Amino acid sequence: MEPFILSPVPYAQLLEDMRAIIRHETAQRPATPAPTEASTSDLLTVQEAAELLDVCPQTIHEWKRRGLLTYHKMGRRTYLKQAEVLAALQSEKRTVKPGAKSR
């Protein structure tokens, strides 16, 4: 390990050095796109997901509990990605109980 030598540095020089380091590091980092409205519109509430799948909200909560739907918490609210909800629609086939239509 190399020895670390402390020497007094004027405050203005320290600020300038820190700014140069930050500029260098941010220039090296690839630019990430800012979140757009389209990316946040992919998120559905539990109620919206239930309406999309034509099931009750309790079914959505049950699917979350069983791990069939991935959900994301923001504060106290739960959101689901629309693509994942539509994928769950394909995997969960609804069945009709025998005798339900005969009445």
Image: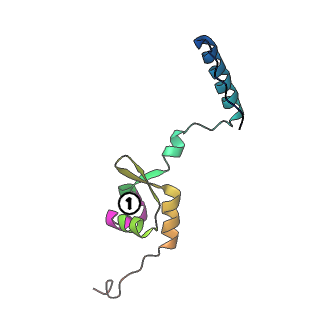
Residue 27, placed above or below residue 49: above
Residue tagged by mark 1? 51
Q: In this view, does 8 lie to the left or right of 55?
A: right
Q: Residues within 10 Å of mark 1 (few under 14, many from 20)?
A: few
Q: Residue at x 64, y 18 (%)?
A: 7
Residue 95: horizontal and vertical position, in percent?
41, 80
Looking at the image, which residue sits at the far left? 103
Where is the N terminus found, in terms of image quarters?
Answer: top right
Q: Which amino acid does label 1 sit on?
A: Glu
Residue 74 coordinates in the image, percent (x, y): 40, 47
Q: Quadrant of the C terminus?
A: bottom left
Please tell me which residue lies in front, 17 or 4.
Answer: 4
Q: Magenta stretch?
A: 49-60
Question: Is 92 inside the magenta-drawn segment?
Answer: no
Residue 54 seen from this side: no
Judge whether residue 58 is colored magenta. Answer: yes
